[in-house]
Image: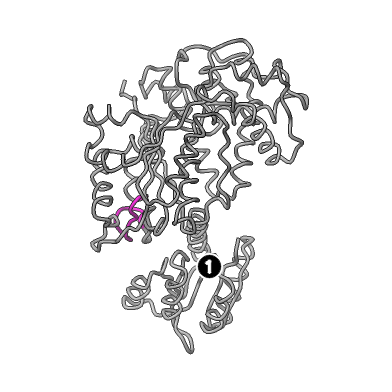
Amino acid sequence: MKPIWIVDDDESIRWVLEKALARENLATRSFANARDAVAALEHETPQVLVSDIRMPGDSGLDLLQLVKQRHPGLPVIIITAFSDLDSAVAAFQGGAFEYLAKPFDIDKAVELIRRALDESLRESSIEAGPADTPEILGQAPAMQEVFRAIGRLSQSNVTVLITGESGTGKELVARALHKHSPRADQPFIAINTAAIPKDLLESELFGHERGAFTGAQTTRRGRFEQAEGGTLFMDEIGDMPFDLQTRLLRVLSDGHFYRVGGHSPLKANVRVITATHQNLEQRVRDGLFREDLYHRLNVIRLRLPSLRERREDIPILVRHFLVQSARQLGVEAKRMSDATLAFLQGLELPGNVRQLENLCNWITVMAPGQTVEIKDLPLELTQGQESSTLAAAPPPPAATDSALPQHHGSVQPLAPPPLAASPEGWLSLLELQAAGMLSSGQQDVMDVLGRQFESALIRTALKFTHGRKNDAAIRLGIGRNTITRKIAELGIDGAKDD
């Protein structure tokens, strides 16, 4: 993480902030005037910039204007001894993250800097993205068709709709389309429309102005602005709320949009790639998806094969995932015997490539030897149960998005978990998942895994109680108001009052 820059001609202010941030284990760099800070910006950038508004020479507002021209995503906090309306308006019009009047409470100043730091790390994570597009592996004829399609679309900016079952690698294909396009040097931004609550999705896509709603303390760029000049990938587009489909259609039609609470149109120069596992034609017939939006998105359709259609790729995928998992944990990679590989090729894996990857993660943690035999596989596989049980029951080596326990598919709600489902198993997988996310530089690991964990628990409890949320709350040991709020925040369907 880069240091926090403090620009103030008052040495005592610099000293106090330096000491307070040092206690928070945050690195700082200080400047006595804006001129020195501007010179330093030629070679490096801070994570957050804190600047006095009135200094000899260039003012803090001059510095703010220059920073926003060069680094629009960098949060700038303006400090001034003149807590008047004109200064506040000028700071916010210039794009300041927040305004802080002297004399200020040092704890509140640190809290404000922390908020700006979180915003900066979030922006950096989104804009940087993975350094390299993960390799798409496959020798099967069905995958060769996919590779040929990516090649044909490499120099095109046309809208693409990617279809296929869950876990087939739709985001990997979207990243490959971006990597080989004329927009490769610009951002690739991905958003899962099904994972974000309806009330927040509009702001995530289009951004919001300061004060647009309760909690909107600063202006925030949406995913369309973050992807400017590059590619915006919207996964699970079939789950987009109907009213938001109208806004998306307008952007695709005329290339303009408004932030939530905004009045000035913004131009979007973005290539849109969407994906879904659902039958959009059926959703159009059911009145759940706009037909005009469907035709806007369905310019080029790219269907990804399920793992059942490319069983010959399982050995190379297994070897790749075992090496990848071992590298993340810093251990020696395990290998599968020929008999084990042949056994896996004969299984039904409804979670497709994602399920296979999670299985390899489980093997890296749980299998006793370096060579994996059939007996070392999870009992859910070797006892010949339906592989959907593997996708549903803890420990979840396979079909969940997060390697956390979830219940879905054909599992009976009241069935007891398998004997092999020990707490140590899924906890080890949780640690593995967290390690992978942390090693990739993701900043919101606690929030992402926490939401998925809560969602899995509540969905499972609702299945046990046939959708009755009050009974589910009692089973989980939480309050009625808590489960109601969580169901809304997590976008969980199927709950009903007792």
**Which residues make up the magenta segment?**
204-216
- Residue located 25% across and 63% down the image: 264
- Residue located 53% across and 25% down the image: 310
Q: Nearer the viewer, residue 226 or 101?
A: 226
Q: Nearer the viewer, residue 433 or 211?
A: 433
Residue 350's place in the image compared with 91, above or below, is above
- Residue located 50% across and 45% down the image: 176
* Residue 208 within the segment the image draws in magenta: yes
Q: Nearer the viewer, residue 144 or 229?
A: 144
* Residue sitting farthest toward the bottom: 57
Residue, disc 1? 106
Q: Is residue 153 left or right of residue 141?
A: left
Residue 57's place in the image compared with 158, above or below, is below
Which image quarter holds the N terminus?
bottom right
Where residue 465 appears, x then y in whole percent? 40, 17
- Residue located 57% across and 17% down the image: 347
Q: How many marks?
A: 1
Residue 71's place in the image compared with 351, above or below, is below
Say what amino acid the circle numbered 1 marks.
Ile
Where residue 52 appears, x then y in whole percent? 47, 78
Which image quarter holds the C terminus?
top left
* Residue 418 within the segment the image draws in magenta: no
Quadrant housing residue 432: top right
Secondary structure under tag 1 reads helix
